Image (cartoon, helix red, strand yellow):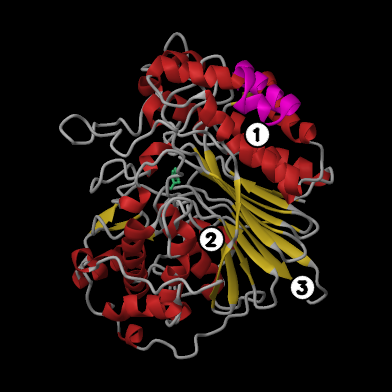
Amino acid sequence: MRRLALPLVFPLLLLLTAPTSACRAGAPEGSGPDTTGTAQRPVQASRGMVVAGHAEASRVGLAVLQEGGNAVDAAVAVGFALAVVLPNAGNVGGGGFLLARFPDGTATSLDFREAAPGAATADMFLGEDGEPVDGRSRLGHLAVGVPGTVAGLLEAHARWGRLPLAQLIEPAIRLAEGGYPLTRRDAHLLNYYREEFLAYPSTARYFTTSDAHPYAAGEAFTQRDLGAVLRRIRDDGRDGFYRGRTADLIVAEMRRGGGLITHADLEAYRAIERPVLVGRYRGNRVLTMGPPGTGGIALLQMLRAVEPYDLNELGINTPEATHLGGEAMRRAFADRARWLGDPGFVDVPTAGLTDSLYVRRRMATFRPDRTTPSATIEPGTPPPTPEGSETTHYSIVDEDGAVVAVTYTINDYFGAKVVVDGAGFFLNDEMDDFTAAPGRPNLWGLIQGENNAVRPGARPASSMTPTIIEDRQGRPVLVLGSPGGSRIITTVFQVVTDVLDCGIDVQTAVSLPRFHHQWMPDVLEVEPAFPDETRAALEALGWTVNEVSTFGAADAILIEYGANGRRRLYGGADPRRENDTALGY
Ligand code: DON
């Protein structure tokens, strides 16, 4: 562990465009059946690329790029296509974040996170005894926030798209009405959740087989009512969803199940363009999502915390690197719990939390030879802001150099498990991302604070972390993100450092076994393929190490620039979810 005591005064600046060395790996090549994926090579292309959570959707996005659409057009088309072919996560009934960097170097982000209905209250998930009612914020109609995806995709298209909207929605309509063959994973997920679906008549009608004969891979799956929802959006834009027949169907569904969303809530919903959160890491610029996203702040904090150390020397998944990373993670998540919420309702001290001196002070208690128990780590007090100053992710690069990262979600797999009758789509259970019950862990095990309390119209804090990295010449070199709840943030952190510090190829970077710590509970989670020797060394240091099933699904694109300025695109699709597919041309 000695090397950890010697932070480099001048961090090694690695030339991203010519990664030569690969970190010392803590795992033998190929260990673990489906989480190392070291045998897979990145998909390569030169003009455009889409890496998304389902091959059908990646194909839709690629076709849009080839037809002359830009990265935002492709993102809109992929978003609608995933709403059809990936009902566990893709959606029109949820929300998300879009991060875009345009060829002129400007960047922006769009917040289309779900909002709490007007009638929501801070204690709506507590029973008469003041205790949280099991499942109320996760299952059924009360768990549903006002959906933002349609507003977000349409807003992105109106501001930055190039092709007509109809052309971008048409493939999704075709997939919904004409059907698509279920993959093994699609069929497995639908069968796995059958019992929960049966609790809601509309969900049972659309997403279970009538005779208990399970769905099979290769079977054609059609969704006619969802096709009609998409047609109304194609024809009437946001009014085709937030008003009229679809809005009526959503409100009727809410009334049937005791949900809160009203016509007024739907009409009032707007996507919000927000400034991109920008930080630096070893001379690279990191563009990521600010509040109500929590991942951007935590990512910058963790990167700043490890920056004084030579990660290339420490290696990947070694005891030294995992100890350092875990300590950085627990401090970032302590701050997340205290400070993060909707910036429209509470003050989030973003600049202070990502200030390098502040993060360095937070790491002052770091000891290379022992753990710092989470019980002794309080959320920090950042300096005041200076004046003036089951989710799916997809990454897209177009021919002109525009880069888009979208993470959108209905929270849990298949959201609240409620399907809108007559419309055929799942509604989110995003209300669980609020502090549904103070002091109690949410679905992701996160303990959260007052800043993230349920307030009418507020958006719950989110771990979604779409991110774009620019190199020291200001060129976009990496675009990525992941699902995985709180584990999104630590997944993105590990892929970024593996690529930037170690020059690991992007497919290997998204495939390698990962670790995660979120302050509370004070447990370091490791994936099954995480090296045993590292686990043993960490336990000796005082870490409580728990093996968990694999998490996250990082879909990333690495952009390399040749001497003649020609670009090479490398796609990394996470093998943890076999539907994830990189396609380029
Ligand atoms: O926004 C959040 O933090 C969560 N609703 C994300 C959920 C998620 O990643 C589900 N994917 N496995």
Amino acid tagged 3: Gly
> Which amino acid lies under the numbered mark 2 shown in the image of this protein?
Thr
The magenta segment: 219-245
Which quadrant of the render holds ligand 1?
top left
Foreground pick, 107 / 285:
107
**Residue, disc 1:** 81
User: Which quadrant: the N terminus?
Assistant: bottom left
For marks 1 and 2, give the CA distance.
27 Å
Residue 434, percent across and down?
Answer: 37, 44
Q: Residues under labels 3 and 2: Cα distance?
A: 21 Å
Task: Report if the CB atoms under discs 1 and 2 are less than 8 Å apart.
Answer: no
**Is residue 200 shown to the viewer in this render?**
no
Secondary structure type for disc 1:
helix
Q: What residue is shown with label 3? A: 562
> Residue, x 28% and y 51% (percent of image)?
447
Q: Is residue 106 left or right of residue 149?
A: right
**Nearer-the-camera pick, 152 or 518:** 152
State the CA–CA distance, disc 1 to disc 3: 34 Å
Mark before the other along the chain sequence, 3 or 2: 2
Q: Is residue 239 located in the magenta-colored stretch of the structure?
A: yes
Kind of element beneath mark 2: helix
- Residue 508: give its label: 2
Helix, strand or loop for the magenta stretch, by majority: helix
- List x then y, in percent, for residue 172: 68, 29
**Residue 124 sits above or below residue 255 on the image:** below
Of the two numbered discs 1 and 2 on the same chain, state the one appearing first in sequence: 1
